[in-house]
Image (tube, rainbow, N blue to C red):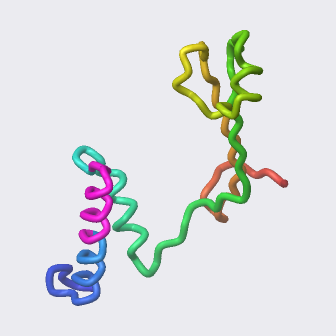
Amino acid sequence: GGNAKGDPEWKERSGAILKTVKELEQKGYTFEGADASVDLMIRRSMPSYSPPFEIVEYSVHNDDATPTANRNERWTGGQAGDYSSKGRKVARCKAVVGVRVAAGMSDCEETM
């Protein structure tokens, strides 16, 4: 509480956030113009933080949107994951994510 500059708890949390940002930047992430990402880090560092949703399941599907004649050859030749193949015309990716929304965080009322 009180003045954030003089709060030792805030000083510790902000130091941890800065350390995380620097570690991520060393891995190639950039935070210039990513105010929302930094805002989430700050919110998550607060003791009162409660996530607005929980991921309960997910699946990701990749396929050729326009399969080519050599598709079977790539699969049998052990190059199924060769996404830079010149024979690959268009890749399609579909992700489905199931979430549980925290109480009071949604206007929707749905039973799973």
Residue at 35%, 51% (x, y): give it: 36
State which quadrant residue 103 falls in: bottom right
Residue 58 image offset from top left, x and y in percent: 70, 50
Residue 79 image offset from top left, x and y in percent: 65, 31
Q: Magenta part mainly helix, strand or loop?
A: helix
Locate residue 40 relative to residue 65 in the image: left or right. Answer: left
Residue 62 image offset from top left, x and y in percent: 68, 32
Spot the residue most to the right: 112
Q: Quadrant of the C terminus?
A: bottom right
| Residue 15 vertical placement versus 66 (above, below) | below
Spot the residue most to the top: 69
Q: Nearer the viewer, residue 17 or 66?
A: 66
State which quadrant residue 42 falls in: bottom left
Q: Nearer the viewer, residue 36 or 15?
A: 15
Task: Determine if the magenta segment contains residue 84.
Answer: no
Residue at 53%, 71% (x, y): give it: 50
Residue at 22%, 89% (x, y): give it: 8
Q: In which quarter of the image is the N terminus?
A: bottom left
Q: How many marks?
A: 0
Task: Determine if the magenta segment contains residue 21.
Answer: yes
Spot the residue most to the front: 77
| Magenta stretch bounds | 18-30
Locate residue 44 relative to residue 50 in the image: left or right. Answer: left
Residue at 69%, 11% (x, y): give it: 68
Spot the residue most to the bottom: 8
State which quadrant residue 39 falls in: bottom left
